[in-house]
Image (tube, grey):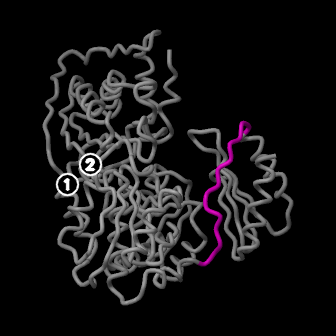
Amino acid sequence: MRDLKQLVKAYDVRGVVPDQWDKDLSRAFGAAFVTVTGATAIVVGHDMRPSSPELSRAFAEGAAAHGADVTEIGLCSTDQLYYASGKLDLPGAMFTASHNPAQYNGIKMCRKGAAPVGEDTGLAEIRELVQGWLNDDDTVSVPAAPAGTVEGKLTQQDTLRGYADHLLGLVDLSAIRPLKVVVDAGNGMGGHTVPVVFDGLPLDLVPMYFELDGTFPNHEANPLDPKNLVDLQAKVKEVGADLGLAFDGDADRCFVIDERGEPVSPSAITALVAVRELARAKAAGESNATIIHNLITSWTVPEVVAEHGGKAVRTRVGHSFIKQRMAETDAVFGGEHSAHYYFRDFWRADTGMLAALHVLAALGGQPGELSELTAEYDRYAASGEINSEVADQAGRTAAVKTAYADVEGTTVDELDGLTVAGADWWFNLRASNTEPLLRLNVEAKDPAKMAELRDAVLAIVRA
């Protein structure tokens, strides 16, 4: 019998189809989802992967069999599913494996209002329920719904225009100057959402890879990997664009390229958007508004937040932690190093598209280049995330902790992995939730110090 702990991760379901899961297991997840949440109605959407329509329909059927009406919104980005969950006030399920290769698929689940379903908020219960329905031969036997359950109805609804209008109502783009923008959708869902959201704006749009194709024929839809930005960087310079935007497979993350073809760090984008959201909050009479940032974002972020009259709150990596802290603090905005951006006015959910609109508004509202605009938000030298394949993650982390524990002037904390900080530098070492990897991020005021720290820690990790 298969162990679903390999399939159900900390934040979502993610695995290879059909080796690790298929439509029968998806139908079971649908039944388990409504059983655990108690939902009588849900919304379901999917990305462009070849397996997504079949898996999402099976999930919908499983949910309906256990008494939930299902609104199917079809092809959508993950943040479009969050919009539907928030607007319709329904729990939701999005079928996507985000940036993973074509053979993967997964489910991102949320409660009504786009509230996350993670390990501690229902996902473990769903996993255990489905695990109990597995037979020794890996077939699934979902029990019948309780007596008296009326089977739910499946209906279809288009939410794309409503999603676009909601986002455009949150950012004033009425007075921006004309901009030339290259967008690389990576054959993912950005090719579905960008044309509608950008329609009518003073933008000269240069599209790249807008054809929806879950086999990703041009490059992986993972902008966090520099090799997947190369085409966009070249096109920005070739056409003389003001900026470039790259979306991941399910289009909930957005990476930004400046007019020189250089990537703008997600921390700089977090700082830029934070300034705009703080100003917006202040104009509405809310002073000292809170901004959430995870512990891998640049020190620039809390510095900029403080300079603009806000309160910065540091949290663990991961959308469920960010959203939880946003709810606790009523934060207006949150950002992560991985280019996930969260907005209070978007049900505290992450939307790369709304972050992109903020960048367009900021750039188009002044005459300078994007590189000039973001320069003040780029104050430190950073390594970026460096992965090391390590069998003994705990042992190697402990070795690094021992090496730095007694270094004068340093602080050590274990909020999320191991973070060690000096007066003008820090590094974080975290174990991957899904792979035998240790992830290292290093930042320092001086590039030489950053390189020295990076190499010293990697030497211990890879010993």
Which element is circle 2 on?
loop
Please state which of residues 33 and 197 is positioned toward the viewer in this rendering: 197
Q: Where residue 133 sits: x, y (%)?
A: 40, 16
Determine contact: label 1, label 2, CB under 8 Å: yes
The answer to whether residue 113 shows anywhere in this view is no
Specify the quadrant of the image occupied by residue 253: bottom left
Question: N-terminal of the two: label 1 or label 2?
Answer: 2
The magenta segment is 379-392
What type is the residue that disc 2 sits on? Answer: Cys
Q: Where residue 115 sits: x, y (%)?
A: 36, 48
Q: Where residue 35 sits: x, y (%)?
A: 32, 27
Residue located 21% across and 27% down the image: 64
The label on residue 76 is: 2
Question: Disc 1 to disc 2, how far (Cα)?
Answer: 7 Å
Residue located 35% across and 28% down the image: 29
The local crowd at label 2, few if under 14, some if 14 to 19, many if 20 or more residues have their Cα within 10 Å, is many
The answer to whether residue 156 shows anywhere in this view is yes
